[in-house]
Image (spheres, rainbow, N blue to C red):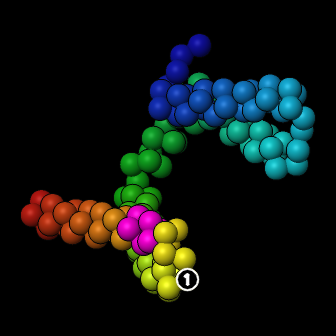
Amino acid sequence: MKIYNKKNFRYGLGMTTLGVLMLLTSIWKGFDVKGTVILALCLFVGIGLMLRSLSRDMSREDKIAELDERNKMVEWRAKSRALGIAELICVVCILISIVGMRIVKDFFGGMLVAFGLMYTIMLLTELLTLLYYDKKL
């Protein structure tokens, strides 16, 4: 048995291991609906990825799809949109923290510092990647 797509096999092995550990934990602590759904998804996705990585044709399809330019563009746009949404959520949390500092200073003061630091890191990361790709392309 040869592994044709090692990356998918590792992901599948990790997901299957996570599913088995969740199964053992559920047997020990008791089953609940949310845990059972996540457990089933982990097992199905993990086993599916491992089976796909053992098939030559399916592994080739996965590698072609991974290198496809349209898929790369969709991934880049999704990551860019996710960063924009995260920045917006951070700004909203900063505004809520500023308003909350009028009521409870200690709790909201710490949140204001944390969200301010996260927002600053996101802006700097965006600026540095913009400069890097502007110079590279």
Amino acid type of the residue that numbered disc 1 sits on in the rendered structure: Ile
Q: Where is residue 63 drawn, in percent x and y? A: 45, 41
Quarter of image, res 41 = top right
Label count reads: 1
* Residue 38 is at least partly visible in this image: yes
Q: Which region is colored magenta?
A: 109-115
Say above or below: 47 vs 107: above
Q: Is residue 5 visible?
A: no
**Spot occupied by residue 6 in the image (x, y as percentages of width and height):** 48, 27
Instruction: Indicate the quadrant containing the N terminus: top left, top right, bottom left or bottom right.
Output: top right
Q: Which residue is at the front of the view, 133 or 124? A: 124
* Relative to 59, residue 123 above or below: below
How would you rate the neighbour count of disc 1 (Cα within 10 Å): few for under 14, some for 14-19, many for 20 or more?
Answer: few
Compared to residue 44, the image places residue 127 above or below, namely below
| Callout 1 secondary element | loop
Q: Position of residue 53 (x, y in %)?
A: 56, 29
Residue in the image at 45% along x and 82% along y: 98
Q: Main secondary structure of the magenta part?
A: helix
Residue displayed at 49% across by 69% down: 106
Residue 82 vertical position relative to residue 20 in the rendered view, above or below: below
* Nearest to the observer: residue 79 or residue 117: 117
Query: Which residue is found at the position 41% from the left and 64% from the top?
Result: 114
Horizontal side of residue 28 vs 47, given as left or right: right
State which quarter of the image contains the C terminus.
bottom left
Membership of 99 in magenta stretch: no
Q: Is residue 112 magenta?
A: yes
**Which residue is tagged 1?**
103
Which residue of the protein is positioned furthest toward the left in this rendering?
Answer: 135
What is the x, y in percent for residue 26? 84, 32
